Each structure stands twice: as structure tokens, then as C-alpha cells.
Image (cartoon, rainbow, N blue to C red):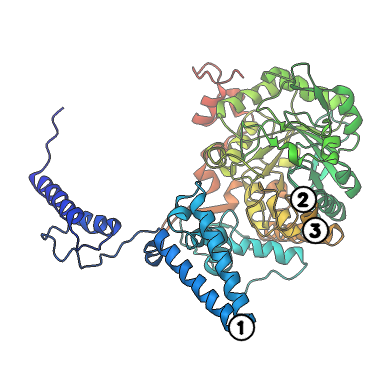
């Protein structure tokens, strides 16, 4: 291959090389390589125009210039000077001055020599003592940004305005805003609810899960907002106790997470949704090969503490990735809850898939089995939507076999977790809006959900993923949900400051740590009230939004109740953005569903991603 390079580029390259050679052999030049590179790349071709005397300003985001002039030689020179000053101070007979100087000098030399000897960090080796400033600033950068720099709508995953709403409502204070909205209503993505000229007046809103399934003999009355899955192990014992106690006060359920039902869940007294993951904690044992397998007797024993059973297929924060709890974090109580040996000699790993079933038909049989073993309690599945064809085929199996769950929980990819690889947190899984809309439309098209009155649906739809306000709940109802779960929002009610140290076991608020010295600071007696307060005020705000839109119940919220700006001066309703939300009940069975939805549904379309 012959590459043609323009002549002017060749001349420029020759000038750069010539300048570099002159600089390297010049005894008069004092310019740094970093500055020279910046000037050369900027295209300064004037034959060494005072290059040895001109300071070319760098746009580097590295160390400040005054630190870059520092060196190991300078470190020693300053150190010798400090040692001399200390000797003079001692000789002068002034104890206060001499002690201060000697102490400072000793610390200076100790830090500097340690920096030079260590071999892990080049900055510290090249710039002893002062190089540590870089790591100090890096360590406090999140706090500096959070408290002094970020705007109300800047931070992620939750901005300050939303965190403030959670804090204020948890304290039982008024969360009204003065002087109008701070949102940019012309910004693409801004959404709003269409209100009615004739608002309604609603009473308490509850969702009866399992009432339309004759096989479910113990249906459950759920609140519109509940605590999402967070395990004991990911959270401290006091955090679990506070959440469970708060849920009891507020009459809503608490999802256990896959870490099983602990004594702290039970002591709190909440209605529990038992989340069963691939490790079968609380209902499983070890097979001869070391894998975890389902145990019917253990399940029957622990299911009496639960109001509903949820089979976790995947979670939004790390779909298709197993969880892991380090052995060092496995306390006696965690081991007891998960039916693990104690003291633990190995990490507690959850595989990415279940061993109790290997295909959709076996999953349907497993759902029926758990419902029978639990005495007719509602049984559901939880997943983050991945291949849409797989979910469509699973729903098809529900219809064909007549064996379907009482509820399906859709977890958005924006969901939180204590720890996950960045590739899984950032790039795997379907976000809640798309996943929820698709799941609802598929279940409607299969005849398992009623789009006109969702309370008549055979399969209830629960959602989770950054639910914090009444407006976010209302939006999810418009996309098809019956119930909302929230995790991090309830952590804010416990006092979470979004320190982002959930994976380090050093959570300063005592929530996501197993260090008893840190969790001691969390008082369950007072925090349970804040949990209940946050729930009450958020549900109240949601109901007020429902009333403003003129509906008679949560079950009548439709996609056209929400508009979203898609371009400047242009907005669409949710069913215009996602046309498959306009699907008619049973349309997929008749072959008349929206094109893309029907393609996912039809088994003879050539798509081969359904075998698991």
C-alpha cells in the first residue's frame, strides 16, 4: 500500500525533528519536554523563536507546574535545610520552636524516603512528599464536588435535587418548591403529565396480586411503592432492621434480596417478598460438586415468613452476572440466613444461572412447584429484559402451558447494586422505560394483561429502577406497571449520602457495611420512622398526580397520560414513542400485533436465541 503524505506535513515534521535535536544538544535551554511538545504540536515552525527562553503554557490536566519543578534532589536540599534549621532551634534553647521543627523535619524525611523507596506509584517516587498532594486531592474530589461544585441537577446516579426530596420527606417536612420549576422544560427528554379539567378524589390505592389466578389461594394486597431487593450482606443488620420495621409501620412490603430471610427481616415484622436467586440461600444446600441446589424442605420451612415468592432470573445492575460476597464479610448471622458453614473459608458466589431449571418449560413447572410448596402464595419472576425474543418465548410458554407467574418484576439496567463490573453496570441490560413498555405490551398481546383496566390482569407487573418521586411512579404506571419498587431511594431515607463506597465495607452511614463500628451509628428506632415517612409522602404525591390526571385508579393510567419532548417544539405521548404500547389484548395470539412485537413472538421467524 502506498500512502501519499502532503509535502507541507513532511516539512512540518522535519522542522519538529530539527528543533528537538537542537533542544537536546543545547546547554542554554530550560524548557521542559512537556512544554516543548505542546508548542511543537501547536505548529510553531519559526526556527527556534526564543524557544529556549519562552515558557509555553501547557494545557495538561496533570500536576501543577510548581510541583513538576520538584525533584528528588530538591527534596534532599530542602530536607538538609530543615535539618539545619532544626539544629539551630535546638541550640537556641527554645523548646516549643525546636520541638515543632524537629517533628516536622522527621515527618518530612520519613514520608519522602518512603515515597522514594516504594515502587507502586511513579508520581510519589519522582516527586517525594509533594506528589502525595495529587492522591490527597483525588481522594477528596468526590466530596469537594458534591458539597461545593455540583449543581442541583448535575450528580449521578441521583442529583442533589432528588436526594433532597428524599431527605426532606423522610424527616416528615414539607417538600414544596418556591418560585416555580427549576427544570428546563424545553430540554429534549423533559416529560410531563397531562392533567384534567376535572380532577378526581381517590382513596387508598392498593394492588391485589394473585387475585385473578385460581391457583393462588393467598393473594397479597400490595402498596403502590415498596422496598426493592437488597440483601442482608449487602446491607448491614441495622439497616435491614430499620427497613423492615419502617415497612411494617407504613404497611408495605420489603423484598429480601437474594441473601435470604434473616432474623433482622423477621424482627422488623414487615411483609416480606422472598427473593430466591441462583444460590438458593435459605432454601438450598451444597451438592457433592460444590454447587448450590434447591432444597424443598428448607423452602417450606422459610416460606412461612414470606407473603410472596420472587424467582430472580437477573437484576438490572448486573444482568447474567452472579453475585459475590467475600468470605471476610460473612458473619455468623449471614451464614445462618444463607445456610452456609461458619466460619466461612471461601467466598460466597452465586452462579449466573439457576440449577433448578434449564429451559422455559422447566421454569414454568418450578413456578407451580413453589406456589404449591408455599401453600398457594403468589409466585413471580424478576428479570432485566435482554433478548426480547427470549421474553416473548417465555410468555408464549405461559400461555401454552397454562402455568404463569402471579407477577413479573422488570428491573431496569439503571438499577443499583453494592458492586458490579463497569461493563455490566454501564452496557448490559435494557433500561426500565424500554424494558417495562416491552414487557407490558407482550403480556397484553398474549392476553395475560388488560390494557383498559390493569387490575383485571392475570399477571401483575412490578417495576424497579431509580424510582424516587410520585412523578416517576406515575410514569411507570403509564408504561404498564402496577407496583413500583425502590431501593436506593429508601437508603436515602436511612441517611445515605451517596458516598459511593458500597463495595468497600467502609460506608460512613453504616448502611452498606458489615463493620459493627460503622453500623453502630445507624439507629433503627429512629430510622424506621423516616422510612415510613418517605413512603407515606411519596405515595401521597403519586396519588395527587393520579387525581390531577382525572383517573379513577392507578389501573386506568394510560401511555397517553405522559408526554415527552423529543425535539425542540415537538413532543410525543409514550404510546407514540413506543407504538407497541398500542397493542390490543390477545393480538399476538391472532397474529395482528405491532410488527416488531409480532416478530419477537412468532416462533418461525428464523431467530434462534430462545434455547437456554
Q: Which residue is mark 3?
A: 522
Vertical relation: 168 (above or below) 453: below
Q: Secondary structure at mark 3?
A: loop
Q: Quadrant of residue 345?
A: top right
State whether residue 468 appears in this view.
yes
Disc number placed over residue 93 in the picture, else none? 1
User: Could you tell which of marks 1 and 3 lies nearer the N-terminus?
Assistant: 1
Please indicate whether residue 142 sits to the left or right of residue 66 in the image.
Answer: right
Q: Secondary structure at mark 2?
A: loop
- Residue at figure coordinates x 65%, y 61% from the top left: 163
In this view, the residue in front, 261 or 371, is 261
Q: Quadrant of the N terminus?
A: top left
Disc number placed over residue 515 in the picture, else none? 2
- Residue at figure coordinates x 56%, y 55% from the top left: 156
Badge nearest the viewer, 1 or 3? 1
User: Could you tell which of marks 2 and 1 lies nearer the N-terminus?
Assistant: 1
Amino acid at each position: 500500500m502506498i500512502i501519499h503524505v502532503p509535502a507541507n506535513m513532511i516539512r512540518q515534521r522535519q522542522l519538529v525533528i530539527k528543533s528537538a535535536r537542537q533542544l537536546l544538544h543545547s546547554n542554554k535551554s530550560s524548557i521542559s519536554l512537556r512544554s516543548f511538545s505542546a508548542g511543537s504540536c501547536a505548529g510553531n515552525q519559526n526556527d527556534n523563536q526564543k524557544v529556549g527562553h519562552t515558557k509555553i503554557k501547557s494545557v495538561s490536566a496533570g500536576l501543577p507546574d510548581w510541583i513538576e519543578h520538584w525533584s528528588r534532589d530538591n527534596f534532599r536540599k530542602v530536607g538538609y535545610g530543615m535539618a539545619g534549621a532544626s539544629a539551630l532551634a535546638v541550640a537556641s534553647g527554645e523548646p516549643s520552636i525546636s520541638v515543632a521543627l524537629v517533628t516536622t523535619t522527621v515527618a518530612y524525611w520519613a514520608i519522602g524516603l518512603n515515597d522514594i523507596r516504594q515502587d507502586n506509584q511513579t508520581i510519589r517516587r519522582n516527586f517525594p512528599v509533594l506528589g502525595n498532594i495529587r492522591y490527597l486531592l483525588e481522594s477528596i474530589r468526590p466530596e469537594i464536588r458534591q458539597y461545593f461544585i455540583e449543581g442541583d441537577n448535575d450528580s449521578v446516579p441521583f442529583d442533589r435535587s432528588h436526594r433532597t426530596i428524599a431527605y426532606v420527606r423522610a424527616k416528615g417536612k414539607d417538600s414544596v418548591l418556591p418560585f416555580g420549576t427549576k427544570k428546563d422544560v424545553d430540554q429534549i427528554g423533559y416529560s410531563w403529565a397531562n392533567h384534567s379539567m376535572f380532577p378526581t378524589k381517590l382513596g387508598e390505592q392498593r394492588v391485589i396480586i394473585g387475585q385473578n389466578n385460581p391457583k393462588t389461594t393467598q393473594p397479597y394486597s400490595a402498596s403502590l411503592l415498596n422496598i426493592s431487593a437488597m440483601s442482608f450482606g449487602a446491607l448491614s443488620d441495622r439497616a435491614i432492621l430499620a427497613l423492615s420495621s419502617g415497612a411494617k409501620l407504613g404497611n408495605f412490603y420489603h423484598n429480601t434480596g437474594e441473601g435470604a430471610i434473616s432474623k433482622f427481616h423477621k424482627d422488623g415484622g414487615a411483609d416480606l417478598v422472598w427473593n430466591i436467586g441462583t444460590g438458593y440461600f435459605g432454601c438450598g444446600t451444597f451438592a457433592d460438586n460444590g454447587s448450590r441446589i434447591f432444597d424443598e424442605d428448607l423452602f417450606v420451612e422459610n416460606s412461612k415468613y414470606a407473603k410472596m415468592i420472587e424467582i430472580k432470573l437477573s437484576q438490572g445492575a448486573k444482568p447474567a452476572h452472579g453475585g459475590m460476597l467475600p468470605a471476610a464479610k460473612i458473619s455468623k448471622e449471614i451464614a445462618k440466613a444463607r445456610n452456609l458453614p461458619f466460619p466461612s473459608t471461601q467466598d460466597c458466589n452465586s452462579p449466573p444461572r439457576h440449577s433448578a431449571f434449564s429451559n422455559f418449560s422447566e421454569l414454568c413447572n418450578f413456578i407451580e412447584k413453589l406456589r404449591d410448596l408455599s401453600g398457594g402464595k403468589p409466585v413471580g419472576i424478576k428479570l432485566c429484559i435482554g433478548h426480547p425474543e427470549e421474553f416473548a418465548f417465555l410468555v408464549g410458554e405461559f400461555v401454552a402451558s397454562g402455568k404463569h407467574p402471579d407477577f413479573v418484576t422488570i428491573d431496569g439496567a439503571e438499577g443499583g447494586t453494592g458492586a458490579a463490573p463497569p461493563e455490566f453496570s454501564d452496557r448490559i441490560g435494557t433500561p426500565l422505560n424500554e424494558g417495562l413498555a416491552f414487557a407490558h405490551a407482550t403480556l397484553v398481546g398474549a392476553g395475560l394483561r388488560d390494557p383498559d383496566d390493569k387490575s383485571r390482569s392475570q399477571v401483575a407487573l412490578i417495576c424497579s429502577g431509580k424510582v424516587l418521586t410520585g412523578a416517576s411512579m406515575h410514569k411507570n404506571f403509564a408504561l404498564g406497571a402496577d407496583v413500583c419498587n425502590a431501593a436506593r431511594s429508601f437508603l436515602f431515607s436511612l441517611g445515605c449520602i451517596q458516598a459511593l463506597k458500597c463495595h468497600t465495607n467502609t460506608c460512613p452511614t453504616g448502611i452498606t457495611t458489615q463493620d459493627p463500628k460503622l453500623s453502630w451509628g445507624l439507629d433503627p428506632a429512629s430510622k424506621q420512622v423516616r422510612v415510613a415517612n418517605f413512603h407515606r409522602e411519596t405515595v401521597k404525591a403519586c396519588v395527587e398526580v393520579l387525581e390531577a390526571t382525572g383517573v379513577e385508579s392507578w389501573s386506568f393510567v394510560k401511555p397517553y397520560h405522559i408526554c415527552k419532548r423529543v425535539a425542540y417544539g415537538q413532543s410525543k405521548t409514550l404510546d407514540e414513542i413506543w407504538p407497541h404500547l398500542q397493542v390490543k389484548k390477545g393480538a399476538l395470539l391472532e397474529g395482528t400485533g405491532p410488527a416488531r412485537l409480532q416478530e419477537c413472538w412468532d416462533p418461525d421467524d428464523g431467530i434462534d436465541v430462545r434455547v437456554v
